[in-house]
Amino acid sequence: MSPRSASVNEAMRQRSRERLLQATVELVEERGYEATTLGDISQRAGSARGLVSYYFSGKRALLQSAVHRLMNMELQAALESEPPTDDGDEVLARAIDAILTLTQTHTTLMRTHMASILQEEGFIQCPEQQRLAQLLRSAVERWGAEDPDEEYPLLRALLMGATVALLLPGAPMPLARLRAELFQRYGLRWSAGRPPAGAVGTVQAAGAEPRAGLVAGVGLEPAAEV
C-alpha cells in the first residue's frame, strides 16, 4: 500500500481537529466547563488523548477555539443566507444578529467563553479566531467603513460588550434594547438582518425611542429621517 499523500494527511488532521472542537461545544453545554475534562472531549471526538495536546495548549485554548469556530460558522451561514444580498447595511445587520443570536442558542457556552477571555491570559489567537475576524472585517468593509481596520476592532468590542450585558447573571440587559443601540450606531433599519427571537418587538418596547435609521417595529418600513 502506497503512503498517504501530504494533502490526505492534512485533511485527516483537520477532521480530527474539527471533531475535538465540536465535542468541546457539546460537552461544555451539557456539563459545564469545570466538569468537562480533556479526556471527556477526546473520547466524545473519537480521538486519541494525545491529539488534544498536539493541537491545543490546554483546555482554555481549546474552548476559545471551539467558540470561535461556532461563531465563524454561524456568521458565515447568516451572511450566505437567502436571499443573497449586496446591500452593505443588510450584511452588517446579519452579522450583528448572528452574534446576538448565539447568546440565546448557546447561553452556557458564550457565558463561559466571555469569562475565559477576561482572565489574565486573555484572548487567544487561533485559526478560528482569524477567520472570524476576516468575516467581521469584511462586513464592516461592505457596510462602507472609511477605515475597516479601525472599525472592525470597535465592532468587535461593541459585540463583546453586548454579549456580556445580555449574559450578566441577575442583571441582563434586554436584547431588543441592545440590538436597537447597535443598529442606531451603524444607521441600520430595524427590519434588516435576522432578528433573534428575543429582539422581536418594537423599539419602544425595548425602551429606546425610534431615531433616524431605525423603525418603530419589526417588519415595518424605515421611519422618515429627521
Image: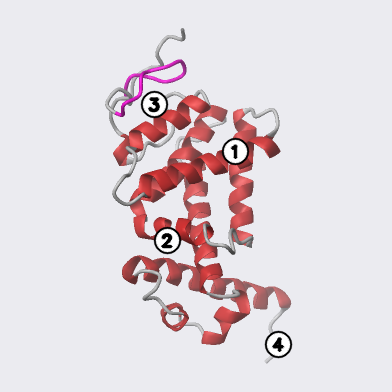
Q: Give the residue number, with chain letter if any, for mark 2.
A: 112
Residue 3's label in the rendered image is 4
Point out residue 134 in the picture as x, y percentages from the top left corner: 64, 47
Chief SS of the magenta region: loop
Three-letter code for the amino acid on which mark 3 is drawn: Ser
Three-letter code for the amino acid on which mark 2 is drawn: Thr
Q: Of callouts 2 and 4, which one flags the residue occurring earlier in the amino acid sequence?
A: 4
Instruction: Verify CB contact (< 8 Å) between mark 4 and mark 3.
Output: no
Q: Residue at x 62, y 80 (%)?
A: 54
Query: Is 39 a magenta residue?
Result: no
Q: Of callouts 4 and 1, which one flags the residue occurring earlier in the amino acid sequence?
A: 4
Q: CA distance from mark 2 to mark 1?
A: 22 Å
Residues drawn in magenta = 206-217
Left or right of 27? Residue 183 is right
Q: Give the residue number, with chain letter if any, for mark 1.
A: 154
Q: Residues within 10 Å of mark 1 (few under 14, many from 20)?
A: few
